[in-house]
Image (cartoon, coloured by chain):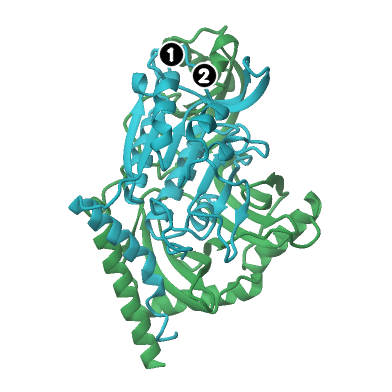
């Protein structure tokens, strides 16, 4: 073991410690908001008679995870998660997580299908938030970690990464594409598998893995359905820490 | 050699201290069950002998599978989400970057192997049958055996292929258990996971499928869904980890001991499809009680 490099494995936990200390002291120079939008009404009474407690767990876990990364994370569900509210918040968001019903919905204005997800709105008539809507509102603003916990969000033809100005490329080399990472599910997936994947992902991130390494760890979960799949785009060797890079790549592990 | 060993021990201790300091909430959970929002894993005590053994195993298996890494670091982890204790060996390249992870159960068997990073524009892509052969070779190289026929699926996140050998007990698939290998598109090894969780005793006289379908339908209808909205499409006898979906006491992590159930699947129709695609109700094959369920949104 080289004496020069013995400290390198300590870097990720040290970064996490610095983030935690900064949050505890409330002394952060800048704030990097992250919104956690979770559709609970669609999958619980009154819209669905079945009780689905996995969804609130996903919300709790995601909010905690974004907080650990240094974001000022706020969770929205029910009447607080509407299309209008999401689009109003999104220009300021550096991080974003949503769990909802996702698909290629028909956009009657454009007369074509577009990737999107449904709002909650606290009732059973739920408008679609199209990727195009988000892209227009964000107008190319930098994103950090974006996790779209919906069916089809990670399909090959998804337009959601672009809505958050995340290039649909996988970067692992020495020329990172920025402090950005997108995670989405491929095809139709079951909630129990998504929960396993997400908890493994957040836990690996908290343990100092890069956003890409955490994805690889999460992919090796004990999923109940053999067809489980997710995909990613962005900078593999990035810590996930909130905010821009002030130099070329200070957070790369 | 002594100096190296001391460095490694100091390193391990420092990692453990920082981990606990950075994530104090996790330590406060102690041996409590996993709680959503917290961490699922926490460091556990590991002797230097166990660390050395784990590193030796990781090096051997890494060599057999072509996993990268010139330096390794080991620590023991208690995982409250997976109900598992394992030895994790991180491998680093010459620049100090994490390039591979090997996890071993405390009995020394591989639990998870991962080559970190992405392989773009590698060699010529292989087809499904070739992927099955490559995956079987990887399993053998890891010192494991893969009985039966593999299930081969394309996997975007896996980099190319996901090849699985599900665990089957008493003719029923144990969901989530077995062996699974991820390969990049050109057949290069990407990852392996092996899971074999405890099972409850199988019932002497399992519930009949018809009874399970009826019980599941009653359950769904009691919750307000009509047969016009949700219709049974399948019933499968499988082992599952109990959860709290559809009611029951709160379980933030899947249950530790799997039960034999009838997984009765309903698909949605009409307007309900805009919010919900499918529901599974897990009926205990022993006594007809609700064990949990699942949802596709």
Chain letter of mark 2 equals: B
Tag shown at residue B205: none
Q: In the image, residue B186 lies at what x, y percent?
A: 75, 59
How many marks the image carries: the answer is 2
| Residue at the (38%, 51%) spot, across then down | A242
SS class, disc 2: loop
Q: Quadrant of residue B263?
A: top right
Is A44 rendered above or below residue A203?
A: above
Q: Could you tell me if residue B259 is visible in this image?
A: no
Chain ID at mark 1:
A
Q: According to the rendering, which colour does chain B have?
A: green
- Mark 1, Cα crowd under 10 Å, few <14 / some 14-19 / many 20+, is some
Q: x, y (%) of residue B28?
A: 21, 53
Relative image position of residue A60 (x, y in whole percent): 33, 37
- x, y percentage for residue A206? 37, 55
In the displayed structure image, the side of residue A77 where residue B59 appears, left or right: right
Asked if disc 2 and disc 1 are in contact, CB closer than 8 Å, the reply is: yes
Secondary element type, mark 1: loop
Identify the image quadrant of residue B75: bottom left
Residue that label 2 marks: B275
Residue plotted at (46% across, 49% down) = A201
Q: Is residue B60 above or below residue A129?
A: below
Which chain is tinted cyan?
A: A
Where residue A47 is drawn, which disc sits there?
A: 1
């Amino acid at each position: 073991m080289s004496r020069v490099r013995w400290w390198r494995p300590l870097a990720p936990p040290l970064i996490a410690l610095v983030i935690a200390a900064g949050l505890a002291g409330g002394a952060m120079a800048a704030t990097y908001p992250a919104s956690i939008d979770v559709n609970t009404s669609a999958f619980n009474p009154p819209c669905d008679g079945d009780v689905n407690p996995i969804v609130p767990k996903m919300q709790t876990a995601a909010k905690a995870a974004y907080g650990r990364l240094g974001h000022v994370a706020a969770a929205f569900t029910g009447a607080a998660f509407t299309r209008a509210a999401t689009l109003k918040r999104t220009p300021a968001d550096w991080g974003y997580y949503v769990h909802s019903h996702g698909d290629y919905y028909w956009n009657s204005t454009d007369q074509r299908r577009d990737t999107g997800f449904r709002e909650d709105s606290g009732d059973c008539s739920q408008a679609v938030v199209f990727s195009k809507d988000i892209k227009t509102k964000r107008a190319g603003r930098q994103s950090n970690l974006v996790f779209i916990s919906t069916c089809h969000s990670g399909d090959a033809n998804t337009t959601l990464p672009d809505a958050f100005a995340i290039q649909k490329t996988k970067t692992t080399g020495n020329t990172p594409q920025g402090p950005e990472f997108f995670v989405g599910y491929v095809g139709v997936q079951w909630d129990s598998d998504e929960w396993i994947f997400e908890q493994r992902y957040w836990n690996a991130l908290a343990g100092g893995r890069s956003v890409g390494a955490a994805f690889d760890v999460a992919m090796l979960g004990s999923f109940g359905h053999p067809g489980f799949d997710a995909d990613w785009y962005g900078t593999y060797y990035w810590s996930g820490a909130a905010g821009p890079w002030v130099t070329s790549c200070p957070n790369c592990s | 050699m002594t100096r190296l060993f001391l460095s490694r021990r100091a390193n391990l201790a420092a990692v453990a201290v920082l981990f606990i300091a950075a994530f104090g909430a996790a330590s406060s959970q102690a041996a409590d069950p996993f709680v959503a929002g917290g961490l699922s894993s926490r460091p556990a005590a590991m002797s230097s002998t166990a660390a050395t053994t784990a590193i030796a195993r990781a090096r051997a298996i890494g060599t057999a599978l072509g996993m990268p890494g010139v330096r390794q670091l080991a620590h023991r982890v208690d995982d409250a989400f997976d109900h598992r204790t394992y030895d994790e060996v991180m491998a680093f390249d010459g620049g100090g970057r994490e390039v591979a992870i090997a996890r071993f159960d405390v009995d020394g068997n591989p639990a998870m192997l991962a080559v970190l990073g992405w392989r773009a524009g590698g060699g010529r892509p292989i087809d499904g049958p070739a992927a099955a052969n490559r995956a079987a070779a990887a399993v053998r190289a890891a010192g494991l055996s893969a009985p039966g026929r593999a299930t081969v699926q394309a996997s975007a996140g896996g980099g190319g292929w996901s090849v699985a050998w599900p665990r089957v007990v008493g003719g029923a698939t144990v969901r989530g258990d077995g062996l699974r290998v991820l390969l990049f598109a050109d057949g290069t090894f990407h990852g392996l996971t092996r899971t074999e969780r405890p099972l409850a005793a199988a019932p002497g006289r399992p519930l009949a499928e018809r009874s399970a379908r009826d019980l599941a339908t009653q359950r769904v209808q009691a919750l307000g869904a009509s047969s016009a909205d949700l219709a049974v499409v399948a019933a499968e006898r499988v082992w599952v980890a109990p959860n709290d979906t559809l009611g029951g006491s709160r379980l933030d992590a899947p249950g530790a001991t799997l039960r034999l159930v009838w997984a009765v699947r309903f698909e949605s129709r009409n307007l309900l499809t805009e919010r919900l695609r499918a529901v599974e109700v897990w009926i205990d094959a022993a006594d007809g009680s609700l064990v949990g369920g699942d949802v596709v949104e």
